[in-house]
């Protein structure tokens, strides 16, 4: 028999404080200022009411990975001053919808998707920040198992983003391949930083590096991530639909 749980807000206050401490500690270890890292709370599968509570607690950035859910949640929160990040694999036929509400799309991994997002952005009179998703475990010319362009294909996807009206190239994003030991995770993030550095040579303003989730945010921050995408560690576990 467990004690009655506190309110949802109490839970989120505690979990958010813990995650912010983890980020601050990793920044300190890396000699980086804590404001070098933006926390994106990934709210997928959790209700719009949680988004509302988070906004009240100072969260400025939320992430979603499915168009239908994201679109409904965004519509339920028109009054909240949030940046909406789309972090999931994206079918071209959903791009127009995502372009209506997303401020940042982290999962641009092919030229056709850049074109489709551009069309949606122009139609809606909006500008989207687009990150090129990098697959750290794929092969050239193919999309990785969790989405993402092979590092060799990043320059052409980036060029397509730059050429696309209504899109601004923000940088790169990656999900660490599952099942890596800590050294493997470190190597994966190091190779992402490599790709990010090469991209910045051609596109100096493309400074975003979106990497790190609940389980590996410290490694990502130590490597140089500018954006971490954290779901479970803030909101608790979700039904395993993803
Ligand atoms: C769900 C998701 C996250 C958050 O994962 P957690 O392990 O719950 O922190 C981050 N990035 C992407 C792309 C996701 O789909």
Image: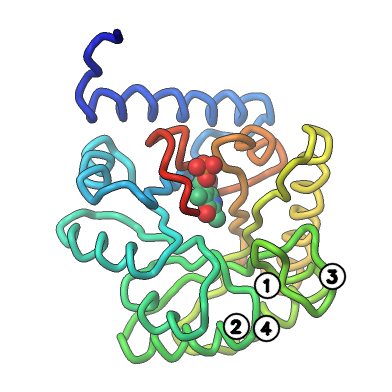
Q: In terms of image quadrants, where is residue 223?
A: top right
Query: Looking at this rendering, what residue extends furthest in the front direction?
Result: 1
Marks 4 and 2: CB-CB under 8 Å? yes
36 or 16: which is nearer to us?
A: 16
- Nearer to us of marks 1 and 2 is 2
- Nearer to us of marks 4 and 1 is 4
**Image position of 216 with respect to 42: above or below:** above
Disc 2 designates what residue? 162
Q: From mark 1 to mark 2, how far is it between C-alphas?
A: 9 Å
Q: Residue at x 78, y 32 (%)?
A: 182
Q: Position of residue 87 (x, y in %)?
A: 50, 60
- Disc 2 on helix, strand or loop? helix
Label 1 residue near ligand 1, CB within 8 Å:
no
Q: Residue at x 26, y 35 (%)?
A: 57
Disc 1 designates what residue? 203
Q: Please report whichever mark, 1 or 2, sits nearer to the chain's N-terminal start.
A: 2
Q: In terms of image quadrants, where is residue 56?
A: top left
Q: From mark 3 to mark 2, how far is it between C-alphas?
A: 24 Å
Q: From mark 3 to mark 1, how far is it between C-alphas?
A: 24 Å
| Image quarter in which the N terminus is found | top left
Marks 1 and 2: CB-CB under 8 Å? yes
Q: Position of residue 152 (x, y in %)?
A: 83, 73
Disc 4 designates what residue? 159
- Within-10-Å neighbours for mark 3: few <14, some 14–19, many 20+: some
Disc 3 designates what residue? 139
Q: Please report whichever mark, 4 or 1, sits nearer to the chain's N-terminal start.
A: 4
- Disc 1 on helix, strand or loop? loop
Label 2 residue near ligand 1, CB within 8 Å:
no
Left or right position of 124 against 185: left
């Amino acid at each position: 028999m467990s004690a009655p749980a506190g309110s949802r807000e109490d839970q989120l206050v505690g979990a958010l404080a813990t995650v912010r401490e983890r980020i601050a500690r990793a920044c300190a270890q890396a000699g980086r200022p804590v404001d070098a890292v933006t926390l994106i709370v990934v709210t997928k599968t959790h209700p719009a009411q949680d988004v509302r509570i988070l906004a009240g607690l100072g969260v400025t950035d939320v992430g979603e990975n499915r168009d239908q859910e994201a679109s409904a949640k965004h519509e339920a929160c028109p009054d909240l001053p949030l940046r909406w990040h789309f972090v999931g694999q994206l079918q071209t036929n959903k791009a127009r919808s995502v372009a209506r509400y997303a401020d940042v799309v982290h999962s641009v991994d092919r030229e056709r998707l850049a074109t489709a997002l551009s069309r949606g952005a122009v139609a809606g009179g909006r500008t989207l920040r687009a990150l090129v998703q990098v697959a750290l475990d794929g092969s050239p010319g193919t999309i990785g198992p969790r989405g993402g362009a092979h590092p060799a294909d990043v320059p052409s996807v980036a060029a397509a983003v730059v050429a696309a009206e209504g899109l601004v190239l923000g940088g790169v994003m990656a999900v660490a391949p599952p099942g890596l030991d800590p050294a493997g995770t470190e190597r994966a993030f190091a190779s992402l930083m490599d790709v990010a550095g090469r991209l910045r040579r051609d596109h100096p303003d493309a400074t975003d590096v979106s990497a790190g989730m609940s389980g590996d945010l410290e490694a990502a921050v130590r490597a140089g991530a500018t954006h971490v995408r954290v779901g479970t560690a803030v909101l608790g576990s979700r039904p395993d639909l993803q």
